[in-house]
Image (spheres, rainbow, N blue to C red):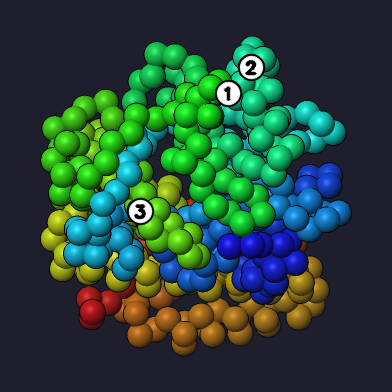
Amino acid sequence: MKLTLEKALKEIEGNRFFKAIEDGELIKISYRFNAPSVFDTPVKRELRGITFSRKTGEVVSRPFHKFFNVGEHEETEEEKLSNREFVAREKLDGTMLHPVLIDGEVKLLTQKAFKNPQTEKGEELLRKNEKLYRAVRELLQKGYTPILELISPQFQLVIPYDREELILTELRQNRTGKYLLEERENELKEMGFKTPPKLTGKLNELKRKIENAEMIEGYVLKDLTVKEPFPLFAKLKSPWYHSHHYAFTYLHNIPDHKLFNLFLQGKADDIFAAVLNRELRRKKQKRLEKMVSLYRTLIETAEKLSDFYGKPEFEIRLKEEIGKIKRKHSKDFSHLNIREDYVKEASRIAKRRGKFENFLGTKLYTMLKAKEVVLTDKP
């Protein structure tokens, strides 16, 4: 899929769940919230860190498109995947980094940042490996993005890696988005890249291989016979990883405020993917969707009210907007005591361009926990 800055910005115009992050001559676009419903078009699925030149509008660094866990999304339902033959790569438990050329030098980016401790560590490792640095720069100069995974004891997630390393997880053509690792792996290895272990098979075969495996996050499954808008990718997590990462066994006992907190932490999708009981999964996903919908409305409201913060009419507009929230969401909630002071403070933070979304997420969690906001039991 060819993509330009103009097309990407048009796609997210008026959409508060994506953001453009600027740094010098670069513009990076990524999502604010990781929920399947956010990625409702092929273009939006590309907006997870993709980086453009402000001057030319062209893609200069293209990380993975958004793809889903097995069972998490309509396209990754097991019945739809069961007869496909996949290339499977070990999914590493690290940090995805994607490079860009700035004034002829290689810089590493994360999905939502131009610079952080992980990018600094990645660049340190590149500087220590001259062959790898040259290889990354050469590919960037030719219009490709080598997508890297940083593994390091310094940034341990679950798996306790005992080494620091940059692993090539994919190669994408910037202009078209084509994935090229499988057809160019030998050449890439000669250039100095290391790649994750690879195997092939159908879904059930791969599940059997991983069901008793330890110290592995899982596999990234790829069906490259699917071409447009991008190949079929899916994440298959290992039972071991699930059991060490989250307490998911008793999903039916998770109260709503804790379920919402999992969403805020970006962990809900992994838990849903681990639950085999479809009815339970559907029920909990529906409850989460209602809470996320309310959260989005609160964000939109605070952003709207921020224009009036400090003005005489603010208090009147605040009461009007909270009334609108209650009318909009009353069918999903038996109690909807939205705290005016929380929305007011969020508006103040938004006016100062602070992280009002984080503030509102925390406060909605608090209201759910205190039973000031209570979901109905209706399906």
> CB of mark 2 within 8 Å of CB of mark 1?
yes
In the image, 109 versus 234, the foreground residue is 234
In terms of depth relative to the viewer, which is nearer, 95 or 355? 95
Residue, x 58% and y 37% (percent of image)? Answer: 146
Q: Is residue 184 left or right of residue 250?
A: right
Q: Residue at x 53, y 84 (%)?
A: 323
The residue that label 2 is drawn on is 131
| x and y, in percent, of residue 16 in the image | 62, 67
What secondary structure is found at the residue carrying circle 1? loop
Front-lying residue, 13 or 351: 13
Residue 14: percent from the left, percent from the top?
Answer: 67, 74
Residue depth check, mark 2 versus mark 1: number of the one nearer the observer: 1
Q: Which mark is residue 223?
A: 3
Q: Quadrant of the C terminus?
A: bottom left
Sequence-first tag of 2 and 1: 2
**Secondary element type, mark 2:** helix
Q: Is residue 200 visible?
A: yes
The residue type indicated by label 2 comes to: Lys
Residue corresponding to mark 1: 191
Amino acid type of the residue that numbered disc 3 sits on in the rendered structure: Asp
Image spot of residue 187 (x, y percent): 53, 29
* Rendered image quadrant of residue 364: bottom left
In screen coordinates, is 144 left or right of 367?
A: right
Q: Residue at x 75, y 55 (%)?
A: 58
**Of the pair 313 and 271, the residue shown nearer to us:** 271
Question: From what the image shows, is residue 43 above or below residue 58?
Answer: below
- 26 shown above or below 193: below
Res 150 visible: no
